[in-house]
Image (cartoon, grey):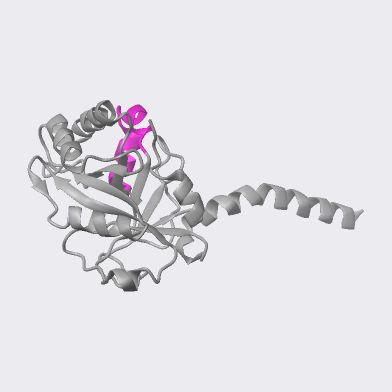
Amino acid sequence: MDGLRSRALALVLVVVMVPITARAGEFIQPWKDPSTALVIDPFSGNGIKWDEMQREARLVAIIHKATIGLDSLDPKYYERKTEAKKRGYLWGSYHWGLPGKPEEQADFYIDMVKPDDEEVIALDLEDVSSVKFMSLGEAEKFVMRVKERTGRYPMIYANHKTAAQISRSAFKATFASTPLWYARFRPDISDFPLGPWKTYTLWQFSSEIRVQYRIPGTESNMDINVFYGSADTLRRAWPFTRK
């Protein structure tokens, strides 16, 4: 009987622990799994050696900085978009949100980028508690203007502090429709801010703040993101929101 009880207890533990283990893998250095897909998000200050970079087979997509505020366009945006698409990379862009006139910022971003239906569109929320950056209320207006213009919700880039503020805010219902691009430069996460999101869509895990991974052909200041899935799965999911 003792042997039967032990085997039954072991079976229960396996059944209970399987989903926990599967969940944990998403938050414990998933980039070390050679099957997971990688995404970079450069701006003009990041160097790229395209031929070398293509040695990283898991790198399948690029989300490039496009616009800031109401009047600034990254000087390498168009050139790099052309080169990336020629080489077969999935493409996306993001807008760096500043305080004031969020609908006009959304218009400027969309007018400059002119995204097609297969491109990621995103809003970078650096710190919604700082007067230097777009507030949560302004971000909601930006999101809804992009939805009105494109028929899609943009991805939201947020660090842990900002994601947690969104999860507690009155605007969380709107953000539940926006995929989360989560910035957290540590090897594991035990306190993901549940609320609008059950998990991240992309996790920006490496940058000049903490270099945890290097891609050939890039310097240590390159931002790198992991998608918890294969390159093929990422290609099917891209651009994460559709009309």
State how many labels appear. Answer: 0
Location of residue 138 (image quadrant): top left
Farthest left residue in view: 71
Q: Please provide the residue range marked out in magenta.
A: 160-178
Residue 112 part of the magenta-drawn span: no
Farthest right residue in view: 1
Q: Where is residue 151? Give x, y as percent.
A: 32, 28
Q: Is residue 233 left or right of residue 240?
A: right
Q: Quadrant of the C terminus?
A: top left
Q: Where is residue 226? Give x, y as percent.
A: 41, 57
Residue depicted at 42% across the width and 49% down the height:
191
Location of residue 184 (image quadrant): bottom left
Location of residue 136 (image quadrant): top left
Residue depicted at 30% across the width and 37% down the height:
154
Residue depicted at 62% across the width and 48% down the height:
19
**Picture layout, residue 41 above or below residue 175:** below
Q: Where is residue 37? Give x, y as percent.
A: 45, 58
Magenta residues, dominant SS class: helix
Front in this rendered view, residue 206 or 77: 77
Q: Where is residue 215? Give x, y as percent.
A: 35, 70
Q: Is residue 162 left or right of residue 3?
A: left
